Amino acid sequence: MIVVTAEGEALVGGMANAGAVFRRGALVERPAPRNIRVLHAYLLALKERGFDAAPTPVGLTGGGREQLTFIPGDVALPPFANWAMTKAALESVGSLLRRLHEASAAIEVDTRAGWPGDVADPEGGTMLCHNDVCPENVVFRDGRAAALIDFDLAAPGRPLWDVAMTARYWVPLVDPASTAAFYPSGLDAPARLRILADSYGLSPQDRAELFGVIEQATDVCRAFVARRVADGDPVYLQALAERGGWERWDRMRTWLAERREMFTAALLD
């Protein structure tokens, strides 16, 4: 459903900026992150290096909102439709992430520029990671990933960290009860993790390390939610209550730990 307001066409999806993102013709207006200048410089540098699968910054409004080019296509929203979880869709996500990383690796990043630490790689790095390649932030055309949007959580880190964060959403790497609420039935998680690694072109060493980084990323995401809840953020309070509370996070952690060997074997065999 399209909602038109005085601000323009409301774009749905996401949590942090829900109800605050609008399309005005060829432009998108949204709340500007605190590090807007360095983030816009990064997005422009991506374009200069041939990566055309991200929004192009246009500027800031008088009210302090950022303006970006609108990228046409389809974005999957929960509960996710079958078309967003096909093998071809997953392969295209892995390939697109690899393209992003190849372009990002050539861009010098000031690690002291105030990048958000919400879900950033705790080990840091010199390459900027997207950190939030969830279905709601991938634009599809003809069933294949065509672009990435919403770089608000981008921060320096290891490429493998970004792969791990992406795997959590796209495999997905959550227990069956959590999967059933948002994803189509019958997804083969070990096989999908292998597909993502293959389409990204993950090295043997990174394949051996990936599952440990996935567990690390899960703990970082849980801590992020805990901080938002402790701060009284109504969006995260509601989401936590609707999605099973802290028991769900404990269940996911246990489920992952019990399947470490199975997922690692799927990556290495």
Image (cartoon, rainbow, N blue to C red):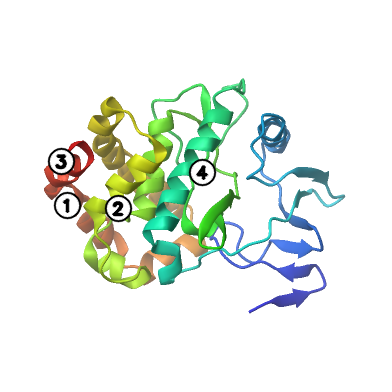
Q: Quadrant of residue 139?
A: bottom right
Residue 199 image offset from top left, x and y in percent: 39, 42
- Report the residue marked by disc 4: 96
The three-letter amino acid code for the residue at tag 1 is Thr
- Report the residue marked by disc 1: 254
- Report the residue marked by disc 2: 192
Q: Residue at x 82, y 63 (%)?
A: 25
- Crowd band around label 2 with a 10 angstrom C-alpha radius: few (<14), some (14–19), many (20+): many
Q: Is residue 84 above or below residue 107?
A: below
Q: Is residue 193 above or below residue 20?
A: above
Q: Quadrant of residue 214?
A: top left
Mark 3 or mark 1: which comes first in sequence? 1
Q: Are marks 3 and 1 in contact (CB under 8 Å)?
A: no
Mark 4 or mark 1: which comes first in sequence? 4
Q: CA distance from mark 4 to mark 2?
A: 16 Å
Q: Are marks 1 and 2 in contact (CB under 8 Å)?
A: no
Q: Residue at x 68, y 62 (%)?
A: 20
Residue 162 image offset from top left, x and y in percent: 43, 38
Residue 255 image offset from top left, x and y in percent: 17, 54
